[in-house]
Image: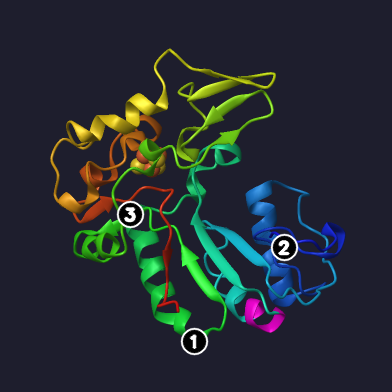
Amino acid sequence: MSGGKSASTRPAAGVVTRAAGGGAGAARGIATEVVRGPGQRRAPAPVLPLHGERIICTVNQANRADVFDLLDIADELGVSLVKFHVFSAIGTGHGNSELAMTPPEWVDFCDHLNEIAKNYQTRVWYQPTYARHDQMARYQAEGYQGCIGRTLDRISIFPDGRCYVCSYLFDTDLHFAQMDGDRVRLNHGENEFDLFTKPLVSSSCGGCKAPACLGGCPAEEIVMGASSCETYADIVPVCRLWKSSAKPEE
Ligand code: SF4
């Protein structure tokens, strides 16, 4: 969540803490423990009105049945935006690949989100990540133009100074630059920018089913060993940095 209230009185991002004891509160605690490890269940915290705050939730096999409850809770608390991300088996997700949802499962999840989002006051966004072939026209109409990495739109700086544009590549040595004190040193070895520009020459899956994907996601092959569209007949990769609204916004 973002905002100015004291962190000690607010639930952490993606973790809902409404009530101690059994029932849904306990189920959510268990889901948290599955993701974060034994003994990492969060203590329930008091719930405050959260007008204007955001919730970002990472969805995986352990919590997928619970996460739609966030929409009720968001409306109850006055949260302005709930954003759903797909769990990746990178970073802290490394070694938990059994928690990852398959591309078709994630697309089905997003379809359901698109159906129910209109019933809620809060804004609802999600990371499409994958689309069925026939869904690409929608994202294209929203302005999707393929790999966002090549626009150098954003950058994440790690405590050790490594700078990445694409969050999907955080576990690789393909960082774009390295902070050296207050100076930025470009990584002159193989770096992610070379990767981002490759689909401009040839698609990253080797046989494009949907031209609107604009070359696909060049990181998939590196991180997963194969592109999602090669693995699943009706799946097209969508840049993980791209977000879409689950309902029309004014
Ligand atoms: S997720 Fe894939 S498509 Fe998006 S910036 Fe990274 S490499 Fe490019």
Find ligand 1 in the image and state its quadrant: top left
Whether the residues at callouts 3 and 2 have beta carbons within 8 Å, the answer is no
Q: What residue type is disc 2 on?
A: Gly
Q: Which residue is mark 2?
A: 29
Label 2 residue SS: helix
Location of the C terminus by quadrant is: bottom left
For marks 3 and 2, give the CA distance: 29 Å
The percent coordinates of residue 206 (x first, y second) are 16, 35
Asked where in the image residue 162 lies, by quadrant, the reply is top right
Give, as a single range, the part of the protein colored magenta.
Answer: 73-77
For marks 1 and 3, give the CA distance: 24 Å
- Where 57 sits versus 233, above or below? below
Please tell me the numbered disc located at residue 28.
none
Whether residue 191 can be seen here: yes
Task: Say if the magenta span includes residue 210.
Answer: no
Q: What residue type is disc 3 on?
A: Tyr
For marks 2 and 1, give the CA distance: 26 Å
Q: Is residue 142 left or right of residue 101?
A: left
* Residue at screen point 40% across, 75% down: 114
Magenta-colored segment: predominant secondary structure: helix
In this view, the residue farthest toward the bottom is: 119
Q: Is residue 223 left or right of residue 32?
A: left
Q: Which residue is mark 3?
A: 130
- Mark in front: 3 vs 2: 3
Please tell me the numbered disc located at residue 119.
1
Disc nearer the start of the sequence (3/2): 2
Asked where in the image residue 43 lies, by quadrant, the reply is bottom right
Q: Nearer the viewer, residue 153 or 204?
A: 153
The percent coordinates of residue 157 (x first, y second) are 61, 32
